[in-house]
Image: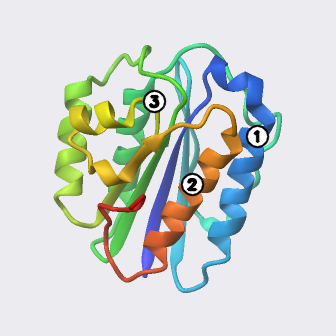
Amino acid sequence: MKTLITIILDESSSMRTKKSDTIGGYNSFLEEQRKLKDDEARFYLIKFNEVVTIVHNNLPLNDVPLMDENTYTPRPGTALYDAIAEGVKLMDKNKKDDERAICVIITDGEENSSRETTKEQIKDLITTYEAKNDWTFVYIGENPDRWTRETNMSASNAIAYCHKKRRSNLELASEACYKIRSTKAMSSKGVFK
């Protein structure tokens, strides 16, 4: 099986207080995903604050470098919608028919800085891509019930962001990806069931 994995990672100011937890969780995510040998994966990392930064674009998972203090630098703003749209656009451009796509959104806050993308556009995007049955969206963030209701995303693929143990958010993301990647299913609407 072949899988495209995108992490859309909040890099806003509120992430500064637990920066090392986020970096450690991200690096653990990569290490765990590399253990799965039956699935060939390519990786994307999109970070966002007031701007969206494409860090990794369609890299083989084993070639993705670990994150450090210099490559994760929180700043003001949360351009969440723009980051999601950019991540999906990049994956869609590279995705082949026999590949599945997993888009993991991790944020400790809510949208406040997008310039190009609206909530309605995100709803349309998620609805369209989930309907293809080879795309899975995972949300680890604020108000997951409201998020899934407003974006039409599968409710069983969303959980609340844990502010006390920030590293655990990326551990949950890794478990979700591993769960999908270790099956032959092209998508999942119940990663947190």
Q: Residue 145 vs residue 171: left or right?
A: left
Asked if residue 80 shows in the view, the reply is yes
Q: Position of residue 89 (x, y in %)?
A: 34, 45
Q: Position of residue 117 (x, y in %)?
A: 30, 25
Residue found at x 39% / y 28%: 82
Disc ID at residue 21: 1
Mark sitting earlier along the chain (1/3): 1
What residue is shown at x 22% (from left), y 66% (from top)?
A: 133
Whether residue 142 sits left or right of residue 32 in the image: it is: left
Q: Amino acid at mark 1?
A: Asp
- Judging from the image, what secondary structure is the residue with disc 3 in? loop
Secondary structure beneath dot 1 equals helix
Q: Residues within 10 Å of mark 3 (few under 14, many from 20)?
A: some
Q: Where does residue 118 sit, x and y in percent of width and height? A: 26, 23
Kindly indicate whether the residue at mark 2 contacts the one at mark 3 (C-beta within 8 angstroms).
no
Q: Are marks 1 and 3 in contact (CB under 8 Å)?
A: no
Compared to 110, does 55 lie above or below? Answer: below
| Residue at which label 3 appears | 142
